[in-house]
Image (cartoon, rainbow, N blue to C red):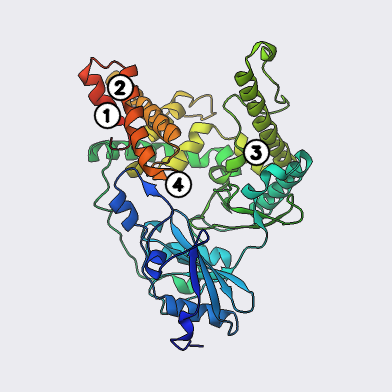
Amino acid sequence: MKWPLGKSRGFSISCHGTKISKESLYEYTNGRFLCDEKSQLARRYLKFDLTELCNEASRVTNGSTVQSIQKMEGGFSKALLMTMNDGKEIIAKLPCPNAGRAMYSTASEAAVLQYHAAGPVGAEYIIMEKAPGVQLFAVWDKVSASGRLKLIKSLTQLESQLATIHFPAYGNLYHRHSISKSSEQILLDPSIDPDGTPEDHADLRDAAMMLLPHLVEWPVVQEYGKPVLWHTDLHMGNIFVSETDHSQIVSIIDWQHTSISPHFVQARWPVFLRPPDDYAMGLQYPELPKNYETLDDDDKKAAKYEKKKADISKGYEVATYLNNQVTYEALWEIHEPTREFFRRIGGTWDDGLVPVQRCVKKICDHWSDLGFPNPCPVGMTSKDMESFRQRCEEYLEWIEVQDTAKKHLDTDDDGWISPEFDFDLKCRQNKEFLDLLIAHNGTEDEEVASKMRRMWPFPA
């Protein structure tokens, strides 16, 4: 059904309750960036044919017409809540240029969701029903302790269902018709600035290739390496619960970038259930610190918060053990550096060499303890060891500075600042925090100050 041109102009467009122009619909307006803002905004700008998108919405709703469009945005996609004249609500999701290779990311998400629309919109898109219910973050504080445990139990049961689906191989899920049969090679983005020389990457590749034949035959990897589809970003914004019973999960959204990977690589704590640093697995239940009564009020409040967080994590651990035994074992039975090795080996161009080098070193150090009968195939000379030790120290120092900046500025790797915050204030705080760090590490030493500026993630 094609709309008459005049009819397509009759709907309102808004964002967070405020009317916006059509051009604002294409722009990224859900925050600012502390670094490289022009490029960050360009990577999230998406022009499309709004009239054709509305025509497609009308087609899939049997002739209903769009009455209003509410713009919602994530880091990689635009989501448009389209309300039809008969009260129906649908979501049109359009991936931004930074979401990944054209066609592939959308085609894979569509295969997972089992509903993909295509047409002359001028951009890739998926039209789907609006998820019923309310996002968990909006009601979490209203959910009782018993209600939270019920919800966690339901979540582990859903994960158990995913774990039982059989797939014959690793990769991404696609409809057969959506993938070209041609063998296509994609060049790396020229903007990528890799850590280390090409020779460093080649050396690490060679070491990894020597380890892999042994690791993939390791009985634990064989047992927990089954290909599974998993949602690896379970935060409260992606979980919808019943409006009348907040402990009942009714839908889970954002399956973009999901893949079929080894079970022990996929298994992880949901974001909102991650335990605190001193969390103890097993039969040891969380307790307040033994010196709790001697703490001041602020420290008592922090201790209670940490215990409450650990209690929720323990609930997930126990529920996973009871409802999803294979995932529990996949999560805890694998040597952690081995898990990280498989997770990180494909990301050295983005994350640098050191994370994978550390995994290789730890695997080699524990080679015989892990039960491998033959000598470790990777060896390191004393010169290699010294170079590695120095790079690790520099890397850990860099990570500490990066994490400090992001924590104090309430931001992420891209320097994203929520529209809830005063951006100019955050820019001033960015410079003030860097100055404080330099002062703490020795203002008199210009070499130290220069090093701190190089490690600081955002221009100041």
Q: Check if mark 1's residue and mark 2's residue have beta carbons within 8 Å.
A: yes
Kindly report the distance in space between the C-alpha atoms of the residues bearing marks 3 and 2. Answer: 45 Å
Kindly report the distance in space between the C-alpha atoms of the residues bearing marks 2 and 4. Answer: 27 Å
Type of residue at label 3? Answer: Glu
Pointer 4 residue: 418
Q: Which mark is residue 438?
A: 2
Q: Residues within 10 Å of mark 2 (few under 14, many from 20)?
A: many
N-term-proximal mark, 3 vs 2: 3
Q: Check if mark 1's residue and mark 4's residue have beta carbons within 8 Å.
A: no
Pointer 3 residue: 329
Residue at (48% x, 88% y) in the render: 2
Q: Check if mark 2's residue and mark 4's residue have beta carbons within 8 Å.
A: no
Determine the secondary structure under disc 3. helix
Kindly report the distance in space between the C-alpha atoms of the residues bearing marks 1 and 3. Answer: 44 Å
Q: Image check: 66 left or right of 181?
A: right
Q: Position of residue 320 (x, y in %)?
A: 70, 41
